[in-house]
Image (cartoon, rainbow, N blue to C red):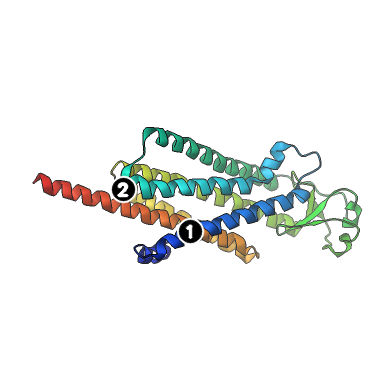
Amino acid sequence: MTVVRAAIISLHDGPAYPWMKAVLYTLLLANFGYYVIDDWARTSFSLADTAGFYDYVKQFNTSLDEVAWFTLLLIFELETYLLDESGWSPRITRVVMVIKLITFFLIGHTLYVNSIALAQILGPVSASAVSDLCDLTNAGQSWLFNLDYISITTDSCGALPQAPQYWEIPGEPVVTSSAGLELARKFAWCDFMETAAWLSVGAAMEAAIRLTDRGVTSGVIVASLRWLKLCLYALILGLGAYWAVYGHWVYLWDELLWIFGFAFLEINLDGWRDEIDTETANTRVRKR
């Protein structure tokens, strides 16, 4: 994170800085489109015909999470870049607070969904009654391994990996092998830790903005928040690297984009604090 911030600081006063932000937000929007398509593609595998509205909400949990984070990132950008200039009217402040509460609710819901999924996959898992995947060709089941879903059909069942035992993924019409189940459990932990880490980053950023808005630019709390965010960014990067090890490079790319986005916010905050410190120093000089 320190390296990223140093790179951004070096370009902060140059003409390329606004373009960097524009490119970043464009890439984040492209990522959002990718997750919508990915969530939609999984519905044909992970949802049964009897799925209700909330089942679809949970299925599109990642897409909703992306919407919440993109909205929150834009609000943080406005607060750290514009609020330090002129402030906002009470009415706009209330509207922004309501939007923030909605975004944090959606992100909290993502954590809730991931925690339920983690508890289910770590709990007792039913063993499939079949020993041959071709016996599931008329059961509406799919095969899962390393987040890759394949419909079990007459044409595909013979090419799928054979295993002495198959397991049913909780809450989904999906089966996998013992190795696939173990991998699914690891990924469930990653999802939970990643969501919790990002939610903590968002809360820490909100606290830092509120402190700065009150003129607090240094001290134990400010330093603690900075170190907390650095540790969380490191954890998130580690999780992104773990996803990449298993071939999911897009998740690492996504983490890097979001960390870059928050690096811009950190630079905005530093500039805001410098302005406050300068104004405070000038006020003291005039009083003398």
Mark 2 surroundings: few (<14), some (14-19) or many (≥20) residues within 10 A: few
Residue that mark 1 sits on = 22
What's the residue at 63%, 42% (across, down)? 113
Find the residue positioned furthest to the left. 288
> Left or right: 71 with respect to 229?
right
**Could you say whether the residue bearing mark 2 is in a helix, strand or loop?**
helix
- Which of the pair 59/225 is nearer the observer? 59
Write the residue at 79% across / 46% down.
126
What amino acid type should be assigned to the residue bearing mark 1? Answer: Ala
x and y percentages locating residue 129 in the rendered image: 87, 49
Foreground residue among 281 and 165: 281
Asked if residue 234 can be seen in this view, the reply is no
Q: On the image, numbered disc 2 is attached to which residue?
A: 220
In the image, taking residue 191 as reference, residue 8 lies left or right, namely: left
Q: CA distance from mark 1 to mark 2?
A: 34 Å
Q: Is residue 25 above or below residue 86?
A: below
Left or right of residue 188, residue 286 in this image: left
